[in-house]
Amino acid sequence: MMSCLMLNNLTKHHLCSMFIPCLIVFLLSSLLMGCRTTNTDSGVLRGDRISLHFPLQNGVSEAIVVGPDRVAARAFDPVTWRTKINNVVVEEPLWTDLEILRTNWCQQPPTFASHTPDAAAYRVVFECHAFSGLPNPIYYVQPANLPEPLHRLIELIPSTAERVLPQ
């Protein structure tokens, strides 16, 4: 009986000592995976199809990313665990229009898109090099030249400064 009690206490202690580090690892990985890890400064999109960064306004940066699961997320940069994020599902026909725009842009970028950084322009990154490890090209587009599907995407998902959507 004593050995069973010792074994029971040893097992509880062992489980408890392993539980806390595992819980910490799980929470950290969930937090990091929950936040998109897109780095559009280098053209790297990790799991996203489109990244659209708004022109700077009063030193504040806001962005929309769209994943292959048709979920668009809009938030202020940089994203932390405290950042409020609005998520919506991109329905048809906008999803198809965005995919056509992405495919066409990757094959032949429009002449109005520039590679020169411009704080007054939208920064647009499309996933053109899936699974290759190559960075995707970064383009800067003046607001007047932003393609219509991207305007519709902006209208679809409100800024968290306007209102936070229920999750």
Image (cartoon, helix red, strand yellow):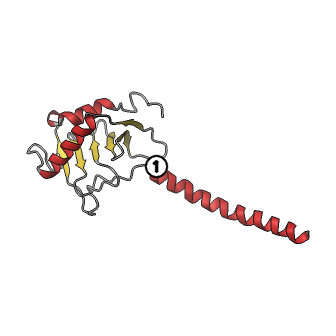
In the image: residue 7, left or right of residue 83: right
Horizontally, residue 18 falls left or right of residue 90, namely right
Left-right relation of 166 to 43 = right
Name the residue tied to disc 1: 34
Position of 29 relative to 99 (above/below)? below
The residue at 35%/53% (across/down) is: 47
Q: Quadrant of residue 135?
A: bottom left
Image coords of residue 3 (percent x, y): 87, 72
Residue 34: x %, y % from top left: 46, 49
Rendering coords of residue 145 (x, y %): 14, 36
Q: Residue at x 44, y 30 (%)?
A: 165
Identify whether 32 is placed above or below 58.
below
Residue 1 versus residue 94 in the image, above or below:
below
Q: Quadrant of residue 84?
A: top left
Residue at horizontal 32%, vertical 54%?
A: 39
> Which residue lies most toward the bottom here?
3
- Visible residue check, residue 112: yes
Could you tell whether 18 is left or right of 114 in the image?
right
Residue 65 placement: quadrant: top left
| Amino acid type for the residue under numbered disc 1 | Gly
Looking at the image, which residue is at 35% across and 30% down? 158
64 or 97, which lies in front?
Answer: 97
Give the SS element for disc 1: helix
Q: Nearer the viewer, residue 121 or 10?
A: 10
Can residue 118 be seen in the rendering of this structure?
no
Give the position of the N terminus as an image quadrant. Answer: bottom right
| Viewer-closest of 11 and 145 | 11
Q: Is residue 111 above or below residue 161?
A: below
Q: Residues within 10 Å of mark 1 (few under 14, many from 20)?
A: few
How far across and how far down the image is residue 21, in percent? 62, 62
